[in-house]
Image: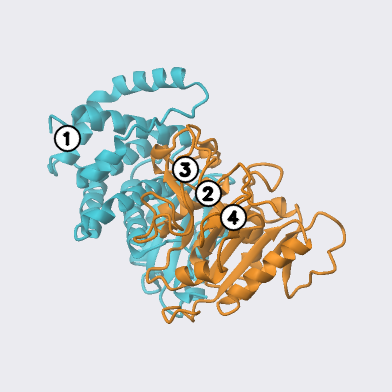
Chain colours: A cyan, B orange
Protein backbone atom coordinates (compact mmCIF):
# COMPACT_ATOMS: atom_id res chain seq x y z
CA UNK A 1 0.00 0.00 0.00
CA UNK A 2 1.25 3.46 -0.84
CA UNK A 3 1.11 5.34 2.45
CA UNK A 4 2.27 8.51 0.74
CA UNK A 5 -1.12 8.76 -0.95
CA UNK A 6 -3.25 8.46 2.19
CA UNK A 7 -5.17 11.71 2.45
CA UNK A 8 -7.52 12.89 5.12
CA UNK A 9 -10.80 13.87 3.57
CA UNK A 10 -14.18 15.20 4.58
CA UNK A 11 -17.37 16.16 2.78
CA UNK A 12 -18.79 19.27 4.43
CA UNK A 13 -22.51 19.61 3.81
CA UNK A 14 -23.89 23.12 3.76
CA UNK A 15 -25.89 25.39 1.45
CA UNK A 16 -23.86 27.17 -1.21
CA UNK A 17 -24.54 30.55 0.36
CA UNK A 18 -22.37 29.47 3.31
CA UNK A 19 -19.44 28.38 1.18
CA UNK A 20 -17.53 31.70 1.17
CA UNK A 21 -17.42 31.73 4.98
CA UNK A 22 -16.46 28.06 5.03
CA UNK A 23 -13.67 28.60 2.50
CA UNK A 24 -12.34 31.51 4.61
CA UNK A 25 -12.22 29.30 7.67
CA UNK A 26 -10.51 26.52 5.74
CA UNK A 27 -8.00 28.99 4.34
CA UNK A 28 -7.11 30.18 7.86
CA UNK A 29 -6.96 26.59 9.10
CA UNK A 30 -4.51 25.46 6.41
CA UNK A 31 -2.39 28.61 6.19
CA UNK A 32 -2.28 30.03 9.69
CA UNK A 33 -4.19 27.66 11.94
CA UNK A 34 -3.53 24.19 13.29
CA UNK A 35 -3.53 22.64 9.83
CA UNK A 36 -0.55 24.63 8.59
CA UNK A 37 2.10 22.49 10.24
CA UNK A 38 0.27 19.25 9.62
CA UNK A 39 -0.52 19.46 5.92
CA UNK A 40 1.64 19.03 2.84
CA UNK A 41 -1.09 19.70 0.27
CA UNK A 42 -4.80 20.31 0.23
CA UNK A 43 -7.45 19.89 -2.41
CA UNK A 44 -10.88 21.50 -2.57
CA UNK A 45 -13.83 20.27 -4.65
CA UNK A 46 -17.35 21.60 -5.01
CA UNK A 47 -19.71 18.66 -4.96
CA UNK A 48 -23.44 18.01 -5.01
CA UNK A 49 -23.79 14.30 -4.33
CA UNK A 50 -26.33 13.75 -1.55
CA UNK A 51 -26.67 17.54 -1.19
CA UNK A 52 -24.40 20.52 -1.77
CA UNK A 53 -21.06 20.00 -0.10
CA UNK A 54 -17.42 20.95 -0.24
CA UNK A 55 -14.93 18.12 -0.31
CA UNK A 56 -11.66 18.92 1.38
CA UNK A 57 -8.68 16.60 1.23
CA UNK A 58 -5.43 17.14 3.11
CA UNK A 59 -2.21 15.23 2.52
CA UNK A 60 -0.74 15.05 6.01
CA UNK A 61 2.86 15.60 6.95
CA UNK A 62 4.36 12.19 7.68
CA UNK A 63 3.03 10.81 10.94
CA UNK A 64 0.41 13.56 11.36
CA UNK A 65 -2.60 11.93 9.73
CA UNK A 66 -4.55 11.42 12.94
CA UNK A 67 -3.73 14.90 14.22
CA UNK A 68 -4.80 16.53 10.96
CA UNK A 69 -8.07 14.59 10.92
CA UNK A 70 -8.75 15.49 14.56
CA UNK A 71 -8.07 19.20 14.13
CA UNK A 72 -10.05 19.40 10.91
CA UNK A 73 -13.00 17.59 12.43
CA UNK A 74 -12.87 19.86 15.48
CA UNK A 75 -12.95 22.93 13.27
CA UNK A 76 -15.76 21.72 11.07
CA UNK A 77 -18.03 20.07 13.60
CA UNK A 78 -17.37 21.75 16.94
CA UNK A 79 -16.37 25.24 15.91
CA UNK A 80 -18.40 25.75 12.76
CA UNK A 81 -21.21 23.31 13.54
CA UNK A 82 -21.14 21.81 10.05
CA UNK A 83 -22.43 18.41 9.03
CA UNK A 84 -19.43 16.43 7.87
CA UNK A 85 -18.85 12.97 6.54
CA UNK A 86 -15.44 11.30 6.17
CA UNK A 87 -14.44 10.99 2.51
CA UNK A 88 -15.62 7.73 1.00
CA UNK A 89 -12.24 7.15 -0.54
CA UNK A 90 -9.16 8.65 1.08
CA UNK A 91 -6.77 8.14 -1.82
CA UNK A 92 -6.54 10.90 -4.37
CA UNK A 93 -6.50 9.16 -7.74
CA UNK A 94 -3.96 11.31 -9.48
CA UNK A 95 -2.08 9.54 -12.18
CA UNK A 96 0.94 11.78 -12.15
CA UNK A 97 2.48 14.74 -10.36
CA UNK A 98 1.37 17.20 -13.04
CA UNK A 99 -2.28 16.27 -12.50
CA UNK A 100 -1.76 16.62 -8.76
CA UNK A 101 -0.14 20.04 -9.19
CA UNK A 102 -3.10 21.19 -11.28
CA UNK A 103 -5.53 19.92 -8.66
CA UNK A 104 -3.71 21.88 -5.96
CA UNK A 105 -3.58 25.00 -8.16
CA UNK A 106 -7.30 24.75 -8.88
CA UNK A 107 -7.90 24.52 -5.14
CA UNK A 108 -5.86 27.69 -4.60
CA UNK A 109 -7.89 29.42 -7.30
CA UNK A 110 -11.19 28.28 -5.77
CA UNK A 111 -10.03 29.57 -2.38
CA UNK A 112 -8.99 32.90 -3.84
CA UNK A 113 -12.13 33.37 -5.92
CA UNK A 114 -14.90 32.40 -3.57
CA UNK A 115 -13.93 33.57 -0.10
CA UNK A 116 -15.50 36.92 -0.88
CA UNK A 117 -17.90 36.09 -3.68
CA UNK A 118 -21.11 34.08 -3.73
CA UNK A 119 -20.89 30.65 -5.33
CA UNK A 120 -23.69 30.48 -7.85
CA UNK A 121 -24.11 29.15 -11.37
CA UNK A 122 -23.22 32.45 -12.98
CA UNK A 123 -19.96 32.78 -11.03
CA UNK A 124 -19.05 29.15 -11.71
CA UNK A 125 -19.82 29.55 -15.39
CA UNK A 126 -17.61 32.64 -15.67
CA UNK A 127 -14.83 30.86 -13.89
CA UNK A 128 -15.03 27.77 -16.08
CA UNK A 129 -14.86 29.95 -19.19
CA UNK A 130 -11.83 31.91 -17.93
CA UNK A 131 -9.92 28.82 -16.80
CA UNK A 132 -10.70 27.06 -20.06
CA UNK A 133 -9.68 30.04 -22.22
CA UNK A 134 -6.32 30.15 -20.45
CA UNK A 135 -5.63 26.63 -21.69
CA UNK A 136 -6.29 27.69 -25.27
CA UNK A 137 -4.01 30.68 -24.90
CA UNK A 138 -1.22 28.49 -23.61
CA UNK A 139 -1.29 25.86 -26.27
CA UNK A 140 -2.11 26.00 -29.97
CA UNK A 141 -2.63 22.24 -29.95
CA UNK A 142 -5.31 22.70 -27.34
CA UNK A 143 -7.00 25.23 -29.59
CA UNK A 144 -6.86 22.73 -32.43
CA UNK A 145 -8.32 20.00 -30.22
CA UNK A 146 -11.09 22.30 -29.15
CA UNK A 147 -11.91 23.08 -32.76
CA UNK A 148 -12.22 19.50 -33.97
CA UNK A 149 -15.39 18.44 -35.68
CA UNK A 150 -16.81 17.09 -32.43
CA UNK A 151 -20.30 18.40 -31.99
CA UNK A 152 -20.92 19.09 -28.31
CA UNK A 153 -24.68 19.13 -28.84
CA UNK A 154 -24.79 15.88 -30.79
CA UNK A 155 -26.09 13.66 -27.99
CA UNK A 156 -28.68 16.03 -26.58
CA UNK A 157 -32.27 14.86 -26.77
CA UNK A 158 -33.36 17.64 -29.10
CA UNK A 159 -30.15 18.88 -30.72
CA UNK A 160 -31.86 21.29 -33.11
CA UNK A 161 -33.81 23.05 -30.39
CA UNK A 162 -30.89 23.04 -27.99
CA UNK A 163 -28.50 24.38 -30.60
CA UNK A 164 -30.94 27.18 -31.31
CA UNK A 165 -31.12 28.05 -27.62
CA UNK A 166 -27.36 27.88 -27.20
CA UNK A 167 -26.87 30.05 -30.24
CA UNK A 168 -29.26 32.66 -28.88
CA UNK A 169 -27.45 32.63 -25.52
CA UNK A 170 -24.13 32.95 -27.29
CA UNK A 171 -25.34 35.92 -29.33
CA UNK A 172 -26.47 37.62 -26.12
CA UNK A 173 -23.10 37.06 -24.43
CA UNK A 174 -20.71 37.36 -27.34
CA UNK A 175 -19.47 40.83 -26.45
CA UNK A 176 -18.62 39.87 -22.92
CA UNK A 177 -17.00 36.62 -24.03
CA UNK A 178 -14.80 38.47 -26.53
CA UNK A 179 -13.74 40.83 -23.80
CA UNK A 180 -12.83 37.93 -21.52
CA UNK A 181 -10.85 36.26 -24.24
CA UNK A 182 -9.00 39.40 -25.21
CA UNK A 183 -8.15 40.08 -21.60
CA UNK A 184 -6.68 36.62 -21.15
CA UNK A 185 -4.96 36.38 -24.53
CA UNK A 186 -3.41 39.86 -24.53
CA UNK A 187 -1.44 39.50 -21.32
CA UNK A 188 -2.99 42.64 -19.88
CA UNK A 189 -3.15 42.18 -16.16
CA UNK A 190 -5.30 45.24 -15.58
CA UNK A 191 -8.80 44.50 -14.35
CA UNK A 192 -7.93 40.86 -14.07
CA UNK A 193 -9.17 39.29 -10.82
CA UNK A 194 -6.46 37.94 -8.53
CA UNK A 195 -7.65 34.36 -8.86
CA UNK A 196 -7.37 34.50 -12.65
CA UNK A 197 -3.86 35.90 -12.50
CA UNK A 198 -2.99 33.15 -10.01
CA UNK A 199 -4.34 30.55 -12.43
CA UNK A 200 -2.52 31.97 -15.47
CA UNK A 201 0.78 32.24 -13.60
CA UNK A 202 0.40 28.89 -11.89
CA UNK A 203 -0.57 27.00 -15.03
CA UNK A 204 2.38 28.51 -16.88
CA UNK A 205 4.69 27.48 -14.04
CA UNK A 206 3.42 23.89 -14.16
CA UNK A 207 3.45 23.47 -17.92
CA UNK A 208 6.09 25.98 -19.03
CA UNK A 209 9.00 23.57 -19.22
CA UNK A 210 7.05 20.60 -20.52
CA UNK A 211 7.70 19.20 -23.99
CA UNK A 212 5.13 20.26 -26.55
CA UNK A 213 4.16 16.64 -27.12
CA UNK A 214 2.81 16.28 -23.61
CA UNK A 215 0.64 19.39 -23.70
CA UNK A 216 -2.47 17.90 -25.37
CA UNK A 217 -2.75 15.30 -22.62
CA UNK A 218 -2.30 17.98 -19.96
CA UNK A 219 -4.92 20.13 -21.66
CA UNK A 220 -7.42 17.26 -21.61
CA UNK A 221 -6.69 16.40 -18.00
CA UNK A 222 -7.02 20.04 -16.98
CA UNK A 223 -10.43 20.45 -18.62
CA UNK A 224 -11.54 17.32 -16.78
CA UNK A 225 -10.16 18.58 -13.47
CA UNK A 226 -11.89 21.94 -13.90
CA UNK A 227 -15.13 20.02 -14.32
CA UNK A 228 -14.31 17.74 -11.40
CA UNK A 229 -13.36 20.42 -8.90
CA UNK A 230 -15.78 23.20 -9.77
CA UNK A 231 -18.63 20.74 -10.28
CA UNK A 232 -20.61 22.71 -12.85
CA UNK A 233 -23.93 21.15 -13.74
CA UNK A 234 -23.96 19.20 -17.01
CA UNK A 235 -25.92 21.82 -19.00
CA UNK A 236 -23.57 24.52 -17.72
CA UNK A 237 -20.49 22.56 -18.79
CA UNK A 238 -22.05 21.90 -22.18
CA UNK A 239 -22.89 25.57 -22.60
CA UNK A 240 -19.35 26.55 -21.58
CA UNK A 241 -17.88 24.20 -24.17
CA UNK A 242 -20.23 25.48 -26.84
CA UNK A 243 -19.38 29.11 -26.07
CA UNK A 244 -15.65 28.50 -25.97
CA UNK A 245 -15.67 26.70 -29.29
CA UNK A 246 -17.57 29.56 -30.83
CA UNK A 247 -15.43 32.28 -29.36
CA UNK A 248 -12.20 30.43 -30.10
CA UNK A 249 -13.18 29.92 -33.72
CA UNK A 250 -14.62 33.35 -34.39
CA UNK A 251 -11.95 35.52 -32.90
CA UNK A 252 -8.72 33.64 -33.53
CA UNK A 253 -7.78 35.60 -36.62
CA UNK A 254 -8.10 39.00 -35.05
CA UNK A 255 -5.77 38.27 -32.15
CA UNK B 1 11.56 -18.62 -22.26
CA UNK B 2 11.52 -15.87 -19.66
CA UNK B 3 13.11 -12.68 -20.85
CA UNK B 4 15.82 -11.18 -18.68
CA UNK B 5 14.00 -7.84 -18.91
CA UNK B 6 11.02 -9.05 -16.92
CA UNK B 7 10.18 -7.08 -13.83
CA UNK B 8 10.07 -9.75 -11.14
CA UNK B 9 8.87 -7.37 -8.47
CA UNK B 10 5.60 -6.74 -10.31
CA UNK B 11 3.03 -9.13 -8.92
CA UNK B 12 0.38 -9.96 -11.46
CA UNK B 13 -2.88 -11.85 -11.45
CA UNK B 14 -4.58 -13.43 -14.46
CA UNK B 15 -8.37 -13.64 -14.40
CA UNK B 16 -10.34 -15.69 -16.90
CA UNK B 17 -13.97 -14.59 -16.88
CA UNK B 18 -16.52 -17.30 -17.60
CA UNK B 19 -19.93 -18.53 -16.61
CA UNK B 20 -18.97 -22.05 -17.66
CA UNK B 21 -16.82 -24.68 -16.10
CA UNK B 22 -16.64 -27.07 -19.03
CA UNK B 23 -13.54 -29.08 -19.90
CA UNK B 24 -12.88 -26.60 -22.72
CA UNK B 25 -12.88 -23.63 -20.33
CA UNK B 26 -10.78 -25.47 -17.76
CA UNK B 27 -8.31 -26.34 -20.51
CA UNK B 28 -8.02 -22.68 -21.46
CA UNK B 29 -7.67 -21.72 -17.81
CA UNK B 30 -4.91 -24.28 -17.31
CA UNK B 31 -3.12 -22.98 -20.40
CA UNK B 32 -3.19 -19.43 -19.07
CA UNK B 33 -2.22 -20.50 -15.55
CA UNK B 34 0.78 -22.42 -16.81
CA UNK B 35 1.89 -19.58 -19.07
CA UNK B 36 1.59 -17.06 -16.26
CA UNK B 37 2.90 -19.17 -13.39
CA UNK B 38 6.25 -17.35 -13.30
CA UNK B 39 4.49 -13.96 -13.20
CA UNK B 40 1.77 -14.43 -10.63
CA UNK B 41 -1.49 -16.12 -9.74
CA UNK B 42 -4.42 -17.16 -11.90
CA UNK B 43 -8.09 -17.48 -11.08
CA UNK B 44 -11.20 -18.42 -12.98
CA UNK B 45 -13.44 -15.42 -12.43
CA UNK B 46 -16.56 -17.49 -12.28
CA UNK B 47 -19.99 -15.99 -12.85
CA UNK B 48 -22.14 -18.20 -10.65
CA UNK B 49 -25.68 -18.51 -11.94
CA UNK B 50 -26.73 -21.64 -10.05
CA UNK B 51 -26.87 -22.44 -6.35
CA UNK B 52 -24.05 -24.95 -6.30
CA UNK B 53 -20.53 -24.33 -7.54
CA UNK B 54 -19.12 -26.87 -10.02
CA UNK B 55 -16.98 -29.51 -8.32
CA UNK B 56 -13.90 -28.53 -10.29
CA UNK B 57 -13.78 -25.09 -8.69
CA UNK B 58 -12.26 -24.21 -5.34
CA UNK B 59 -10.83 -21.12 -3.67
CA UNK B 60 -7.34 -21.92 -4.95
CA UNK B 61 -8.25 -21.70 -8.61
CA UNK B 62 -11.42 -19.62 -8.76
CA UNK B 63 -13.16 -16.51 -7.53
CA UNK B 64 -16.92 -16.70 -7.81
CA UNK B 65 -19.43 -13.92 -8.01
CA UNK B 66 -23.16 -13.58 -8.61
CA UNK B 67 -25.32 -10.94 -10.25
CA UNK B 68 -25.71 -9.26 -6.87
CA UNK B 69 -22.40 -7.46 -7.45
CA UNK B 70 -24.37 -5.14 -9.73
CA UNK B 71 -25.83 -3.59 -6.58
CA UNK B 72 -23.59 -4.87 -3.80
CA UNK B 73 -20.50 -2.91 -4.83
CA UNK B 74 -22.39 0.39 -4.59
CA UNK B 75 -21.45 1.43 -8.10
CA UNK B 76 -24.03 2.50 -10.67
CA UNK B 77 -24.45 -0.07 -13.47
CA UNK B 78 -25.47 0.96 -16.98
CA UNK B 79 -27.90 -1.94 -17.32
CA UNK B 80 -29.58 -4.55 -15.16
CA UNK B 81 -27.26 -7.33 -16.25
CA UNK B 82 -23.53 -7.90 -16.46
CA UNK B 83 -23.62 -7.61 -20.24
CA UNK B 84 -23.78 -5.16 -21.80
CA UNK B 85 -21.55 -2.65 -20.16
CA UNK B 86 -20.89 -3.84 -16.61
CA UNK B 87 -18.17 -6.41 -17.20
CA UNK B 88 -15.72 -4.39 -15.10
CA UNK B 89 -17.73 -5.10 -11.94
CA UNK B 90 -16.33 -8.64 -11.42
CA UNK B 91 -12.78 -7.36 -11.78
CA UNK B 92 -13.39 -4.55 -9.30
CA UNK B 93 -15.04 -7.04 -6.95
CA UNK B 94 -11.91 -9.18 -7.13
CA UNK B 95 -9.64 -6.13 -6.72
CA UNK B 96 -11.42 -4.98 -3.58
CA UNK B 97 -10.86 -8.38 -2.00
CA UNK B 98 -7.36 -8.84 -3.43
CA UNK B 99 -5.80 -5.35 -3.60
CA UNK B 100 -2.22 -6.54 -3.39
CA UNK B 101 -1.36 -7.19 -7.04
CA UNK B 102 0.50 -4.69 -9.20
CA UNK B 103 -1.27 -5.67 -12.41
CA UNK B 104 -4.56 -7.44 -13.15
CA UNK B 105 -5.17 -9.25 -16.45
CA UNK B 106 -8.81 -9.64 -17.44
CA UNK B 107 -9.57 -12.21 -20.13
CA UNK B 108 -12.98 -13.23 -21.42
CA UNK B 109 -13.47 -16.93 -22.14
CA UNK B 110 -13.86 -16.45 -25.90
CA UNK B 111 -10.44 -14.84 -26.33
CA UNK B 112 -7.64 -16.94 -27.77
CA UNK B 113 -3.97 -16.29 -28.38
CA UNK B 114 -2.63 -18.18 -31.37
CA UNK B 115 0.72 -18.95 -29.80
CA UNK B 116 2.15 -19.43 -26.34
CA UNK B 117 0.31 -17.06 -23.97
CA UNK B 118 3.61 -16.31 -22.25
CA UNK B 119 4.75 -14.46 -25.39
CA UNK B 120 2.01 -11.91 -24.78
CA UNK B 121 2.37 -11.79 -20.99
CA UNK B 122 6.16 -11.57 -21.03
CA UNK B 123 6.24 -8.87 -23.67
CA UNK B 124 4.17 -6.43 -21.67
CA UNK B 125 5.78 -7.41 -18.38
CA UNK B 126 9.13 -6.45 -19.86
CA UNK B 127 8.14 -3.06 -21.24
CA UNK B 128 10.11 -0.18 -19.69
CA UNK B 129 7.23 2.27 -19.26
CA UNK B 130 4.43 0.16 -17.86
CA UNK B 131 1.04 1.44 -19.06
CA UNK B 132 -1.73 1.47 -16.47
CA UNK B 133 -4.25 0.18 -18.97
CA UNK B 134 -3.57 -1.88 -22.10
CA UNK B 135 -6.46 -2.93 -24.26
CA UNK B 136 -7.36 -3.08 -27.94
CA UNK B 137 -8.84 -0.69 -30.51
CA UNK B 138 -8.26 2.46 -28.44
CA UNK B 139 -9.80 5.46 -30.21
CA UNK B 140 -10.78 9.04 -29.48
CA UNK B 141 -14.32 10.33 -29.93
CA UNK B 142 -13.56 12.25 -33.09
CA UNK B 143 -12.22 9.09 -34.77
CA UNK B 144 -15.45 7.13 -34.33
CA UNK B 145 -18.13 9.61 -33.26
CA UNK B 146 -21.07 7.34 -34.12
CA UNK B 147 -20.12 4.55 -31.75
CA UNK B 148 -23.19 3.48 -29.81
CA UNK B 149 -21.84 3.60 -26.25
CA UNK B 150 -20.22 7.06 -26.03
CA UNK B 151 -23.08 8.65 -24.19
CA UNK B 152 -23.30 5.98 -21.52
CA UNK B 153 -20.51 7.78 -19.67
CA UNK B 154 -22.68 9.78 -17.32
CA UNK B 155 -22.74 11.48 -13.97
CA UNK B 156 -25.68 12.53 -11.84
CA UNK B 157 -25.01 16.22 -12.37
CA UNK B 158 -21.92 17.00 -14.43
CA UNK B 159 -20.59 16.16 -17.87
CA UNK B 160 -17.33 15.25 -19.65
CA UNK B 161 -17.04 17.03 -23.01
CA UNK B 162 -17.31 14.61 -25.91
CA UNK B 163 -13.97 15.52 -27.43
CA UNK B 164 -12.24 14.23 -24.29
CA UNK B 165 -13.75 10.75 -24.49
CA UNK B 166 -11.88 7.60 -25.49
CA UNK B 167 -13.14 4.12 -26.29
CA UNK B 168 -11.47 0.72 -26.25
CA UNK B 169 -12.43 -2.87 -26.98
CA UNK B 170 -12.08 -4.91 -23.80
CA UNK B 171 -12.36 -8.69 -24.22
CA UNK B 172 -8.83 -8.77 -22.81
CA UNK B 173 -6.94 -6.05 -20.97
CA UNK B 174 -4.31 -5.46 -18.35
CA UNK B 175 -4.88 -2.81 -15.70
CA UNK B 176 -2.63 -1.57 -12.92
CA UNK B 177 -3.36 -1.40 -9.22
CA UNK B 178 -3.24 2.42 -9.40
CA UNK B 179 -5.76 2.40 -12.23
CA UNK B 180 -8.15 0.13 -10.35
CA UNK B 181 -7.84 2.30 -7.27
CA UNK B 182 -8.67 5.29 -9.44
CA UNK B 183 -11.69 3.62 -11.05
CA UNK B 184 -12.96 2.28 -7.73
CA UNK B 185 -12.76 5.77 -6.25
CA UNK B 186 -14.54 7.38 -9.18
CA UNK B 187 -17.33 4.79 -9.27
CA UNK B 188 -17.75 4.54 -5.52
CA UNK B 189 -17.24 8.08 -4.26
CA UNK B 190 -18.06 10.16 -7.34
CA UNK B 191 -20.76 7.90 -8.82
CA UNK B 192 -19.71 8.01 -12.45
CA UNK B 193 -21.15 5.26 -14.58
CA UNK B 194 -20.70 4.05 -18.11
CA UNK B 195 -20.04 1.13 -20.39
CA UNK B 196 -16.59 -0.09 -19.42
CA UNK B 197 -15.36 0.39 -22.97
CA UNK B 198 -15.73 4.15 -22.64
CA UNK B 199 -15.49 4.55 -18.88
CA UNK B 200 -12.13 2.86 -18.33
CA UNK B 201 -10.02 4.48 -21.08
CA UNK B 202 -11.61 7.91 -20.74
CA UNK B 203 -11.39 8.33 -16.99
CA UNK B 204 -7.98 6.72 -16.64
CA UNK B 205 -6.53 8.91 -19.34
CA UNK B 206 -8.10 12.08 -17.95
CA UNK B 207 -6.87 11.28 -14.46
CA UNK B 208 -3.36 11.28 -15.90
CA UNK B 209 -2.77 7.53 -16.11
CA UNK B 210 -1.03 5.92 -19.07
CA UNK B 211 -3.18 3.96 -21.52
CA UNK B 212 -1.97 1.92 -24.49
CA UNK B 213 -3.00 -0.58 -27.16
CA UNK B 214 -1.86 -4.22 -27.49
CA UNK B 215 -1.38 -3.80 -31.22
CA UNK B 216 -3.64 -2.80 -34.04
CA UNK B 217 -3.25 0.73 -35.34
CA UNK B 218 -3.76 4.23 -34.01
CA UNK B 219 -2.24 6.81 -31.71
CA UNK B 220 -2.25 4.62 -28.58
CA UNK B 221 -0.14 1.82 -30.06
CA UNK B 222 3.32 1.79 -28.41
CA UNK B 223 6.31 2.06 -30.69
CA UNK B 224 6.99 -1.24 -32.41
CA UNK B 225 3.58 -2.71 -31.57
CA UNK B 226 1.59 -1.83 -34.67
CA UNK B 227 -0.56 -4.89 -35.37
CA UNK B 228 1.82 -6.83 -33.15
CA UNK B 229 -0.57 -8.82 -30.96
CA UNK B 230 -3.71 -8.42 -33.02
CA UNK B 231 -4.58 -7.17 -36.48
CA UNK B 232 -6.93 -4.23 -36.58
CA UNK B 233 -9.23 -3.21 -39.39
CA UNK B 234 -11.60 -0.36 -40.03
CA UNK B 235 -14.82 -0.49 -38.12
CA UNK B 236 -18.13 0.41 -39.71
CA UNK B 237 -19.72 3.85 -39.66
CA UNK B 238 -21.29 3.12 -36.27
CA UNK B 239 -17.97 2.17 -34.70
CA UNK B 240 -18.80 -1.54 -34.64
CA UNK B 241 -15.69 -3.69 -34.98
CA UNK B 242 -16.63 -6.41 -37.43
CA UNK B 243 -13.23 -7.15 -38.94
CA UNK B 244 -9.69 -7.82 -37.75
CA UNK B 245 -8.63 -10.51 -35.30
CA UNK B 246 -10.12 -8.70 -32.28
CA UNK B 247 -13.69 -7.91 -33.18
CA UNK B 248 -17.20 -7.83 -31.84
CA UNK B 249 -18.54 -10.24 -34.41
CA UNK B 250 -18.73 -12.43 -36.52
CA UNK B 251 -17.34 -15.48 -34.73
CA UNK B 252 -13.88 -16.59 -35.72
CA UNK B 253 -13.21 -20.18 -36.66
CA UNK B 254 -9.75 -20.14 -38.21
CA UNK B 255 -6.87 -18.56 -36.32
CA UNK B 256 -4.65 -17.70 -39.26
CA UNK B 257 -1.91 -15.50 -37.80
CA UNK B 258 0.61 -16.69 -35.26
CA UNK B 259 1.08 -14.82 -31.97
CA UNK B 260 -2.10 -12.84 -32.38
CA UNK B 261 -5.09 -12.36 -30.12
CA UNK B 262 -8.46 -13.46 -31.46
CA UNK B 263 -12.01 -12.68 -30.37
CA UNK B 264 -14.69 -14.01 -30.44
CA UNK B 265 -13.65 -17.62 -30.82
CA UNK B 266 -16.26 -20.24 -30.13
CA UNK B 267 -15.05 -23.80 -30.26
- Please tell me whether mark 1 sits on a helix, a strand or a loop: helix
Mark 3 vs mark 4, CA separation in Å: 24 Å
Q: Quadrant of residue A237?
A: top left
Above or below, B230 against A190 in this view is: below
- Label 2 vs label 4: CA separation? 23 Å
Q: Residue at x 40, y 47 (%)?
A: A224
Cα distance between the residues tagged 1 and 3: 31 Å
- First reached walking from the N terminus: tag 2 or tag 4: 2
Q: Nearer the viewer, residue B38 or A39?
A: B38
Q: Which residue is mark 1?
A: A182
Residue B43 percent coordinates (x, y)? 68, 69
Residue contact between numbered discs 2 and 1, judged by CB atoms under 8 Å: no
Q: Nearer the viewer, mark 2 or mark 4?
A: 2
Helix, strand or loop under label 4: helix
Could you tell me residue B69's position as x and y percent?
71, 55
Q: Residue at x 35, y 20 (%)?
A: A167
As helix, strand or loop, the secondary structure at mark 3 comes to helix
Please name the residue that numbered disc 3 is placed on.
A16
Q: Which residue is mark 2?
A: B169
**Marks 2/1: CA–CA distance:** 42 Å
Same subunit, labels 2 and 1: the answer reads no
Q: Which mark is residue B160?
A: none
Q: Nearer the viewer, mark 1 or mark 3?
A: 1
Cα separation, mark 3 vs mark 2, equals 41 Å
Foreground residue among B116 and B248: B116
Q: Chain of mark 2?
A: B
Q: Is residue B60 left or right of residue B254?
A: right
- Residue corresponding to mark 4: B188
Mark toward the viewer: 2 or 1: 2
Query: At numbered mark 2, what does the secondary structure look like: helix, strand or loop?
Result: strand
The chain to which mark 3 is attached is A
Amino acid sequence: MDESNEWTGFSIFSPRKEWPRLLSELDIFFNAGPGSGLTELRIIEFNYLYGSNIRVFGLPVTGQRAALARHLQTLLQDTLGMQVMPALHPKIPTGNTTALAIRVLLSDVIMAAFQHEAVDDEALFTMVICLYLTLLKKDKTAMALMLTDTDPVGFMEDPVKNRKQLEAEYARNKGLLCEMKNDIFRNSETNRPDWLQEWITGYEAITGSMPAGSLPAIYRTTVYLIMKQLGPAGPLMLQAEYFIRKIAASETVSL
Amino acid sequence: MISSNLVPAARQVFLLLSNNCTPRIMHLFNQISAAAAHLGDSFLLYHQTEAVLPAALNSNNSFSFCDNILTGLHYLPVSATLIPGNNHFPLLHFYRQHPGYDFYWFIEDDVRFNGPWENLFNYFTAQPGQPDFISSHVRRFDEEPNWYWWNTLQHVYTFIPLHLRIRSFNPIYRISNAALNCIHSILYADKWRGHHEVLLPTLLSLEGLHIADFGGVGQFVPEGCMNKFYVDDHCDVFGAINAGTMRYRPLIENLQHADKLYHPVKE
